[in-house]
Image (tube, rainbow, N blue to C red):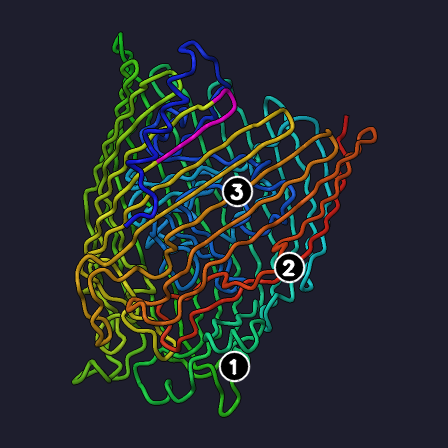
Amino acid sequence: MYRLSPSFWLPALFLPLTAQAENATYQADPLVVTGSRYQASGWQLPFSVNRIDAEQATQGKPGVNLSEALGSVPGLVVQNRQNYAQDLQISSRGFGARSAFGIRGIKLLADGVPLSNPDGQGQAATFDLDTLERIEVLRGPFASVYGSNSGGVIQLFSRDGEGAPKVALDTSQAAYGTSRTRVSAEGGNDRAGFIINRSHFETDGYRDHSGAILDKTFAKLTLYPDDLSKLSLSFSELDQNDTQDPQGLTWDQVQTDRRSAAPSALAFNTRKTVDHRQLALNYERSFAVGTWQSTLYSGTRRVIQYQSIPKAVQENSDKHSGGVIDFERRFHGIGNRWIQSFDLGSSLLTVTTGLDYDYSRDDRQGYENFVGDTLGVKGDLRRDERNEVTSLSPYVQAAWQLGKLEIQAGLRYNHVEFDVDDNFILSSACLNPQTENCDDSGSATYREWTPTLGASYALLPNLNIYASWGKGLETPTLNELSYSGPGNSFGFDLKPATSEQFEIGLKARLAEATNLQVALFQIDTDDELVVASAQGGRNSFQNAAQTRRRGVELALESRLSDTLRANLAYTEIDATYSKDFTSNGRLIAEGNHLPGIPARTLYGELAWQPLDWFSTAVEGLYRSQLYVEDSNTAKTAPSYSLFNWQARFEQKAGALTFNQVLRIDNLLDREYIGSVIVGDGNGRYYEPGPERAWYVGAGVQYQFD
């Protein structure tokens, strides 16, 4: 049950709106493309979409994690694990909350290129915030227009090089042995533009055994062959060597020493190395009748990860794949779309047709993480296979504008195929698949149509109401399939989770510089994918019966004066299992809460810039308690409130621009759990967040004539 009663307070929002004049004028709304795929005002679209510009996302912030930029978006829960070996955990209206590492269930895109694998597993660390132009976040039914595993969409856009050439150098120091250095160059004219950025980040980490070194490179060349076309070529690289993994802690360990690492992490020297490289090409050309857009990308990713799986567990099972993950991934894809508008006299119809193709191939090995009595080293081979994931999805979308009414509809066909070729077979006869290492080769294919439909109507010049509906598909990821079959074999019998989503909402201007968005939603999911067991260093998954998520989101943006700006985001969600099911021999009762999803989150920011050369801001975050496993009996991660403060200074001297930043996170020095590991079989659910932490930075930019 909601603690807030939307039926009580929602009508009250109309009162100040109806009091405003019909002919009031407002600032232009920022344009977005996410959801509709063509430039449109987010004000008119019949779904929840937010735009965060670079200034709000990065100014006065370290520029390391995507979590820094997304606090003002309702419906999103961003948990910083303080563990660069496992990346951020991000969920959208509950999608992605169970992810044990990285981001899953949410489509990540950068300049139209997927940062998510075709199976839905993604990594946010590969994007460079230094080159950011804007972020667009889509939630609700229309997220499914981006294919399977799109419970939400986070799309990042890098800026094009423009203006006179300039070079910049920034450096920063922060608590816990953290430092960062960045060098960049950019510029452009009406024929071409370029941007090059290189950054080096290192930290000892808040917790023991959580040190990391990240080197990122981003380069982009933009060409304008003529007035009707644009071509962009970009390259990105991430080098992340021997990043330490402190793992989660039990509640007793948190109380004893919240900065400690799990003993097994120290014993096995758990760590991860990532080398990621990607090349992408975007082409757009306008014709008299429409616009053609094409995206082509290709890349490689190499990962070596040392886990803490006990030696005895591996020795006692011929089927165990070892405690060292070693794979090389090659991936590529192409997306093509045609956007055409039809003037129907009193209305305008815009139709988009497209085809997305994504492919990845992993050459994957597993090794024992010991040699004799020496732990944390690569031992004997225990796994050798080829994994392929292919996604092919044609789609069509239509937007029909009829005066005050706008109707949007979409239909997408999702085809996701997994193929496994097992080259490590110890039991050719395979008399007992539960215990013998047999041939685990096989394939699984998931197919589903996902329709969407929505409409918005302008009740007043300053008030739009809307409603939308859609169906979604969430396939298991490759890692979820890997150990979910008999005897930890591939779980090719896992079903995809299918959902039906409803959303109603309003978008309003309470004043010339104040925007309000309110959304109420319900998501019913069949065959929800949940953690079945987490033992011996391996998570296996199963399909639960049904789940229901109902909630309300509120976002308020206001420029209170020429110098003062405020943002507020509130989310309340009731996420429960709507049918009983059995997991790992336990009955999970109807009404139990889905783990990893807070019932309430609140974010607020107040920014003040009284002078051209000085700005300051304070932000606050509240998050309610988190359940950590399906039975809801383990200790919950307690609720917490945090406050952060930052100040920025800038000076100009001819062609030089200097800047300095001072920032304090967790201003009141609160102890809190930053993120949780859902369903951990060892009870190590908790990843503590850092205490009060300082950050200072300085930079200089030189602009050529």
Q: Which residue is mark 2?
A: 692
Note whether 696 is above or below 471 in the view shown. Answer: below
- Relative to 576, 14 lies left or right: right
Tell me whether the residue at label 3 lies in contact with that at label 1, contact meaning CB atoms closer than 8 angstroms: no
In percent of width and height, residue 610 lies at 70, 30
The disc placed on residue 387 is: none
* Helix, strand or loop under label 3: strand
Q: Which residue is mark 1?
A: 263
Residue type at the position of mark 3:
Gly
Residue type at the position of mark 1:
Pro
Q: Nearer the viewer, residue 586 or 454?
A: 586
Note whether 705 is above or below 207 in the view shown. Answer: above
Whether residue 336 can be seen here:
no
Q: Quadrant of residue 84?
A: bottom right
In percent of width and height, residue 73 lies at 45, 41
**Magenta highlight range:** 511-518
- The dominant secondary structure in magenta is strand
Point out the residue furthest to the top here.
345
Q: Quadrant of the C terminus?
A: top right
In percent of width and height, residue 452 lies at 23, 35
Q: Nearer the viewer, residue 43 or 560?
A: 560
Q: Nearer the viewer, residue 162 or 665?
A: 665
Q: For marks 2 and 1, give the CA distance.
A: 25 Å
Q: Which residue is mark 3?
A: 604
- Relative to 303, 62 lies left or right: right
The first of marks 2 and 3 along the sequence is 3
* Helix, strand or loop under label 2: loop
